[in-house]
Amino acid sequence: MLCPKCGKSVENFFIFCPHCGYSLMKKTNEEFKLISKENNELSPSYGLIKINIFLLIILIFITLGFFCFIWFFMQMPALNRMNSDRKIGKKGFYLCFPFYFASFFLFFIGIVDWIFFLVMYFKVLSILDDHFNKHLKMNINFSPAGVLFLGILYLQYKINKL
């Protein structure tokens, strides 16, 4: 395909033109579409990173939970491109890093960190719900209880099923 702005050739699965940076996303009021890398069909979830749940558990365990930060940073661009009024900002993560490291020494700060992640899990859940159910009318069941008890594992499971 050709970039509408600079006219240079671009692969179909690119989200932005690598030459001029122009957004190649196709967006309408009714739905949010991106070109899928696999079969050139329109895909509402292109950009969300799918990770095996067992691998995710191992990564969280090995990194003593630090992979949760990495997971949010990996998923943040795709989540923020979705049709939702809610967005995930980076400021909260930067403020939370010291609390994460201090939580090994102070139990109370660990609780504060856990509450921060719980809020972020529900924010991601609401973005997914807005995008897939309100804008795309796909009627995907997102469980607040699943987020409450399983957090990032539940969210990744739902992303993998898209």
Image (tube, rainbow, N blue to C red):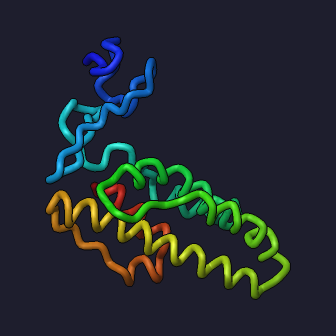
- Foreground of the two, 160 or 98: 98
111 over 60 or under it: above or below:
below
Q: Quadrant of the C terminus?
A: bottom left
Q: Quadrant of the N terminus?
A: top left
Where does the image place residue 121, in percent across and percent down from the top left? 48, 71
User: Left or right of 135: which side holds 14?
Assistant: right
Residue 28 visible in the shown view = yes
Image side of residue 68 versus residue 46, left or right: right
Which corner quadrant of the image does residue 21 belong to?
A: top left
Q: Is residue 34 above or below residue 19?
A: below
Image location (x, y in percent) of residue 51: 45, 52
Total labels: the figure holds 0
Q: Residue at x 46, y 82 (%)?
A: 148
The furthest residue to the bottom: 108
Q: Nearer the viewer, residue 129 or 54?
A: 129
Q: Nearer the viewer, residue 20 or 39?
A: 20
Which residue occupies the extreme right position in the image?
Answer: 105
Residue 2 occupies quadrant = top left
Relative image position of residue 56 (x, y in whole percent):
53, 59
What residue lies at 17% left-to-right and 51% top-to-bottom? Answer: 29
- Measured along the vertical axis of the image, is residue 54 above or below residue 104? above
Confirm whether residue 59 shows in the render: no
Residue 83, position as x, y percentages in the image? 29, 56
Q: Nearer the viewer, residue 47 or 123?
A: 123
Residue that appears at 66% across and 66% down: 65
Q: What residue is drawn where x is 28% and y is 66%?
A: 130
Which residue occupies the extreme front position in the image?
Answer: 5
